[in-house]
Image: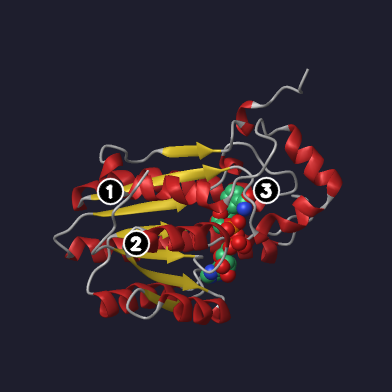
């Protein structure tokens, strides 16, 4: 599908790597400008060099820090004058057994994966409320919002929270012409999953449940995110789109 985001500005968290980077690249290819909020300052500098300052603004941001979240939105508006589409992609994970994992590890995951999304919904939503133009928000949750990741209770709880944050926002922000939707990806070939994919046993186990027998390319998630930000999806609000090659349907072993 060919999208046109000319004269549009996206706010993209986690845009320095993986799925977020694919959103950056697809959005710029479709004519848009981007504000990228990410922890990785070196990658932000490299991407500024690659795309140029007319198109790309990198704002070093820890999405779990409210002052930095608000600053990222303000910096984007100062640079480009307005914002149109938010893609809340930044995420992290720490695995551990529910009974023994420290609350410091829980807080780390929940603060980034859930609180970070909520704070950006608030900051972006307040900005769109001041504009005469509509907005969209796409949250990257996970199929682990539906089926728990083994030893990933903090992550799964956070992602289920993102799904509900999406639904809450879809009701409360609709009066301000903001549509809010979520994508629930299955396995995606990004640095986040590299160590799992490179472990032959874990990889074989993951492939058992994926009907296509491969992880997604990040751009296969980014294309759905752009669709949810385009007028082509004008009646879609509060939805969770599962993008997993059917993995969540694969509850029975292959016979
Ligand atoms: P990735 O590790 O390639 O990219 C994550 C990006 O988020 C990085 O650029 C990193 O610097 C940034 N980031 C991490 N913590 C941050 C923080 N505190 N503040 C600001 N930026 C921070 O990972 P990815 O696979 O592209 O994951 C992107 C999103 O997709 C995450 O929310 C992840 O949970 C979700 N997801 C990934 C998969 C998968 O299989 N890769 C599956 C389902 C959902």
Q: Toward the viewer: 44 or 153? A: 44
Residue 131 visible in image: yes
Q: Is residue 218 above or below residue 209?
A: below
The reply, left or right, for residue 57 in relation to residue 103 is left
Q: Residue at x 24, y 47 (%)?
A: 174
Crowd band around label 1 with a 10 angstrom C-alpha radius: few (<14), some (14–19), many (20+): few
Q: Which residue is mark 2?
A: 122
Q: Upstream in the sequence, badge 2 or badge 3?
A: 2
Secondary-structure class at tag 2: helix
Q: Secondary structure at mark 1?
A: helix
Does the Cβ of the disc 2 residue fall within 8 Å of ligand 1?
no
Q: Which of the numbered marks, if any, corresponds to residue 29? A: none
- Residue at the right extreme of this rendering: 201
Labels 1 & 3 near each other (Cβ < 8 A) = no
Q: Is residue 217 left or right of residue 153?
A: left
Where is the C terminus found, in terms of image quarters?
A: top right
Hey, which residue is sitting farthest top in the picture? 255
Foreground residue among 182 and 173:
182
Badge 3 residue CB within 8 Å of ligand 1 = no
> How far from the left and from the top, in percent, is residue 65?
48, 73
Where is mark 3, residue-wise? 153
Q: Quadrant of residue 192?
A: bottom right
Name the residue beneath numbered marker 1.
172
CA distance for labels 1 and 3: 28 Å
Label 3 element class = helix
Residue 165 visible in this rendered orientation of the protein: no
Q: Position of residue 57 (x, y in %)?
A: 39, 77
Q: To which quarter of the image does residue 248 belong?
A: top right
Q: Nearer the viewer, residue 77 or 170?
A: 77
Separation of marks 2 and 3 at Cα, in angstroms: 26 Å
> What x and y, as percent, mark residue 225?
42, 49
């Amino acid at each position: 599908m060919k999208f046109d985001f000319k004269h549009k500005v996206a706010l993209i968290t986690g845009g320095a790597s993986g799925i977020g980077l694919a959103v950056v690249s697809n959005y710029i290819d479709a004519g848009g400008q981007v504000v990228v909020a990410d922890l990785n300052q070196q990658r932000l500098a490299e991407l500024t060099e690659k795309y140029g300052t007319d198109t790309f603004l990198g704002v070093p941001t820890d999405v779990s820090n409210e002052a930095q979240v608000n600053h990222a939105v303000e910096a984007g508006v100062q640079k480009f004058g307005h914002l149109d589409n938010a893609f809340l992609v930044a995420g992290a994970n720490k695995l551990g057994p529910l009974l023994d994992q420290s609350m410091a590890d829980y807080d780390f995951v929940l603060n980034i994966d859930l609180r970070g999304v909520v704070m950006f919904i608030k900051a972006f939503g307040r900005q769109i409320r001041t504009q005469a133009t509509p907005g969209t928000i796409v949250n990257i949750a996970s199929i682990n919002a539906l089926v728990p990741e083994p030893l990933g209770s903090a992550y799964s709880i956070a992602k289920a929270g993102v799904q509900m944050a999406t639904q809450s926002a879809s009701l409360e922000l609709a009066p301000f012409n903001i549509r809010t939707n979520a994508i629930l990806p299955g396995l995606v070939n990004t640095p986040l999953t590299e160590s799992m994919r490179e472990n032959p046993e874990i990889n074989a186990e993951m492939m058992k449940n994926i009907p296509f027998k491969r992880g997604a390319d990040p751009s296969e998630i980014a294309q759905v995110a752009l669709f949810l930000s385009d007028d082509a999806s004008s009646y879609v609000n509060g939805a969770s789109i599962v993008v997993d090659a059917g993995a969540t349907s694969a509850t029975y072993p292959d016979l």
